[in-house]
Image (cartoon, grey):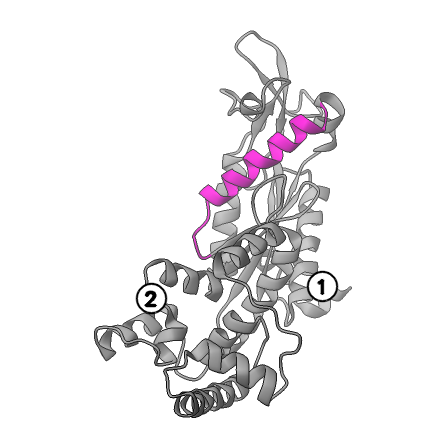
Amino acid sequence: MSYSRQLQELEDQGIDLIEVLGQDRHIDSPEALEKIISQLGRNGDSIYSELLHYLTRRHFNPEQAKRLWAAIMKNKARMTELLGRKVAFRVAALDYLSNRSGILRQVRLIARPEFESILSHVNTDEVTGIYNRRYFNEILSQEVRRARRYSNELSLLLLDVDDFKRVNDAFGHVEGDAVLRRLGRLLRDNTRQTDSVCRFGGDEFAIVLPQTSNAEAGTLAERIRKAQPMSVKAGSPDSVFSIPRTFSVRSGTPEGVRDTDSDSPKDVGRAGEARDVLTVSIGVATYPGDCEEAEELIAFADQMCLEAKRQGKNQIRLSGEHGLGPARAAE
């Protein structure tokens, strides 16, 4: 889970960490504050980077953020003394960052409910209801920076629905969109709150997995692959994506071997009608073992997904299985 979402959850519980650390309000005990910060997994310096990003949507390195926080606190004390009334940290921050330092220009004020509504529209894919490519780019960059700072692993899954064009060609785009929505829900159901499930584009999905090794990501990928094979037939959106009773794709092995009597997976329904069975190919890559930057992580996971496609689809490919490093990936 991103730091922003953690802070939002705390605010929903009545704990505004910016207000607390900005000395606008107090919680029960210093121990309670220390516990909250510990749960967020941050140390005393870098937390200011995260809080200022949450407040301004600007990135500041830990030293710069700590200096800015101290300067805002001094500005808050100065404004309180001059005005003869208590000044909130956010008001002091707005004054310092816009009037005194000039870091923020042409500032607009917006209440939290309206801001969250805007973010929801900006970050959500309208077809699937999961995060969109814009959010994916932002969260992956953030998580790579965080993994680098704390020497953690970070894995990325890229999923591609096998032969998805068949669905749109046979049943139309409305049915195809229904399949993608159901797949988005399936991915969310099989991941943690700390993971970010995003629509990468078209029939491709991405899952950002903080503090996850290559092997752990591979285990998740296989669980998703086994949960995924489903039949498609024309009908209402609720019936489009139904678990078939029998598969012609055997999902007991990572390779996902196909039956040899058909070029494409089929499922026989209750009335004996043939229905296409959708499967997924998944590529897995991990920072820092495979790469050093977010763009490289995407490229490497995409390479693994393409290899899974070339090897017959309905399978996963892990970078760790091949012993590939950045130099090999660049080739």
User: Which x, y percent locates residue 294?
Assistant: 64, 66
- Indicate the position of residue 146 as horizontal and vertical percent values: 52, 72
Identity of the residue drawn at 49% across and 74% down: 50
Counting residues from the start of the chain, the first of labels 1 and 2 encountered is 2
Magenta region, residue range: 172-194
- Which amino acid, mark 2? Ile
Q: Measured along the vertical axis of the image, is residue 200 above or below residue 153? A: above
| Circle 1 Cα neighbour tier, 10 Å, few/some/many (<14 / 14–19 / ≥20) | some
- Position of residue 179 relative to residue 108, above or below, is above
* Res. 323 image quadrant: bottom right
Quote the CA–CA distance across marks 1 and 2: 45 Å
* Pick the front one: 18 or 297: 18
Task: Report whether residue 127 is seen.
Answer: yes
Whether residue 192 is in magenta: the answer is yes
Give the number of the disc on residue 44.
Answer: none
Residue beneath disc 2? 15
